[in-house]
Amino acid sequence: MRALADFTIEPGQGGGGNVLHFSGPMVVSSLGLVDRRLRQIADPVDEIDVSDVERMDTVGAWTVWRLSQQLGAKIVNCRDEAERLINAISKADENRESIRAPRLPLIERVPDEVGKMVIALAVGFLQIIGFLGQAISAIGMTLRHPRRFRGLALVHQMELVGVNALGIVGLMSFLVGVVIAQQGAVQLQQFGAEIYTINLVGRLTLRELGILMTAIMVAGRSGSAFAAQLGTMKLTEEVDAMRTIGVSPTEALVLPRILATMIMLPLLGIYSSVLGIIGGAFLGSVSLGIPFLTFLARIQEVVPIHDVWVGLVKGPVFGLIVALAGCYQGMQVKTNAEEVGTRTTSAVVLAIFTVIVLDAFFAVFFTKIGWG
């Protein structure tokens, strides 16, 4: 049968105050019932005698120390081991230091956090440039040794990035074309110029929204997949295993994804633009009384050819940004599965933000060179 701790309260010798005598093992497994009784003590106690305690652990030492502080009693007749534990508990109990780290005043904390954020962005930018350098180096190595290029991996990634995205990109582009035509027609009808809805749909779709919406869709669909796939491979040490057997992860994993995205995004952009124009033509034939074929024929007259080239030039650049963001974030995973989710989110946000910023730059650039 397991021995339990117990206590008695007796008058002190020579008419002194009461003495609380502990007996038995003062360990965590034997203190349950005793602790309840100790909390109900109402008599004054001057001393706590632990001479009959067989053994004591940290919980027992804390119980004795807490009781001595609560009753204002002195602990007597401690064995060496028990005395060391009680002393350690008393020192820990006397520690009144704050568990929170000191914080700077608000007027200093805000610039400090902003500065840290700016430095982190600068470091991240340099790391992305370095990652791009690794990819360019891998391309150079592949050109020197063409047999090392993984053509099947490239075709597989082209299927995942491009062919498998045709459905969602086509539906999105068709509906965007419908929305642009409907909203544009509502505004132009006020001036009796609804025929210019064709100009609006054609130029806006081929020049801006076709490739931009496609890039955003690919960033959310394929960029996130790149980050999750490579991040999981980092966690399962597949990337380390590839390095061990002499295979470059950049050549085997990163390069096919970057090239596939750069090749397929311009094609998806053209496909998206065509579906957007068809969506606008559909709404024109239903709501504006513009025949479907007339709408398409008019597109050829009002849309200059350089608008098509603008969309084509943006495609590979946006594809590079999307693939680079996804692969970079995936290769930065180091610790646990939670980081895979965080890096995947970061890849999508980084890609979409950079694509929109570059699209604004391209808009100004092409206007300056006369392709406005």
Image (spheres, rainbow, N blue to C red):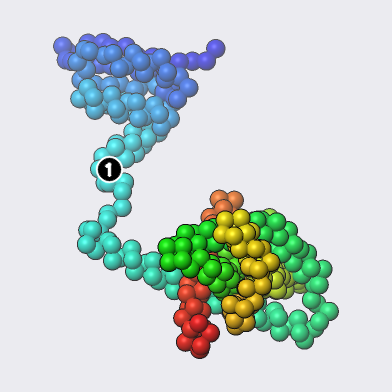
Residue depicted at 45% across the width and 25% down the height: 28
Identify the secondary structure beneath mark 1: loop
Q: Residue placed farthest to the right in the image?
A: 147
Within the image, what quadrant is residue 148 found in? bottom right
Q: Residues within 10 Å of mark 1 (few under 14, many from 20)?
A: few
Image location of residue 43, percent across then percent down: 21, 12
Seen from the viewer's position, the closer of residues 162 and 235 is 162
Within the image, what quadrant is residue 13 found in? top left
Q: Residue placed farthest to the bottom in the image?
A: 369
| Amino acid type for the residue under numbered disc 1 | Asn
When the figure is inspected, residue 158 is found, relative to residue 306, above or below; the finding is: above
* Relative side of 37 to 353, left or right: left
Image location of residue 5, percent across then percent down: 42, 17
* Relative side of 139 to 351, left or right: right
Tell me, yes or no, if residue 208 can be seen here: no
Seen from the viewer's position, the closer of residues 16 and 188 is 188
Residue depicted at 83% across the width and 79% down the height: 147
Image location of residue 224, percent across then percent down: 61, 59
Q: Which residue is mark 1?
A: 95
